[in-house]
Amino acid sequence: MATVPPAFHLLAKPTGAVCNLDCAYCFFLSKEMLYPGSRFRMADELLETYVRQLIEAHSHVPVVDVAWQGGEPTLMGLDFFRRSIEIVDRYLQPGQRAAYTIQTNGTKLDVDWAAFLRQHDFLVGISIDGPREIHDTFRVTKGVAAASTRSCAGLGSCGARGSSTTSSRRCTPRTWTAGLRSTGSYATSATRGSCS
């Protein structure tokens, strides 16, 4: 008989494969075509069911990780995430707390997002491919505009508001070589709102 681990980490993708960028290497964007007619938005009923089941599955641990990824999760809007916090608060058991994380391209983050993320102590991961010239080679908007300025602005908004923020870098042979040349390393780095 299988036993359930006392705690586990699960990433929810509330927008599925939908993203506001069109990264050259992304394998996930094509997944939109598998579901013609889908709005690719987690419905409120599903959000409630997901959170309830996640917390119930962690009934014997003090910290429940609530993690969001995409596509681009910020396309759900702040109201979705405010509702998710309310639902989490409703289902947490006495003595339990939630640890929130979100992985984003950072292009939608502004002062309102940053204040919300800080208020709820989110760990924010912002995907940056390296220096601007490398980042903008691979990460572009749907209209083929460079994305680094908006990603760095989002990182700056979070850093200015005191959010715990990391930048994760995608490694390809080209970004690896350029990253080593420009930074000396290519590990995920904790940052406070800087982009280089």
Image (spheres, grey):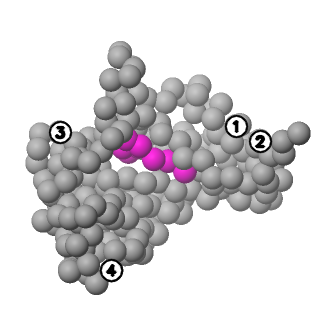
Q: Is residue 71 magenta?
A: yes
Q: Amino acid at mark 2?
A: Glu
Q: Earlier in the sequence, mark 4 or mark 1?
A: 1
Q: Amino acid at mark 1?
A: Arg
Residue under label 4: 185
Residue 142: give its label. 3
Q: Nearest the camera: 70 or 153?
A: 70
The span picked out in magenta is: 67-74
Q: Nearest the camera: 37 or 114?
A: 37
Residue under label 2: 56
Q: Amino acid at mark 3?
A: Lys
Q: Rounded to the nearest whole Å, what is the CA distance between mark 4 and mark 1?
A: 41 Å
Q: Quadrant of the C terminus?
A: bottom left
Residue 130: give its label. none
Q: Rounded to the nearest whole Å, what is the CA distance between mark 2 and mark 4?
A: 41 Å
- Kindly indicate whether the residue at mark 3 contacts the one at mark 1 (C-beta within 8 angstroms): no
The image shows residue 164, relative to residue 105, as above or below, that is below
Q: Earlier in the sequence, mark 4 or mark 3?
A: 3
Residue under label 1: 52
Residue 157 in view of the camera: no
Residue drawn at (39%, 74%), measured in percent from left and top?
A: 187
Q: Which structural element holds mark 1?
A: helix
Q: Is residue 174 left or right of residue 123?
A: left
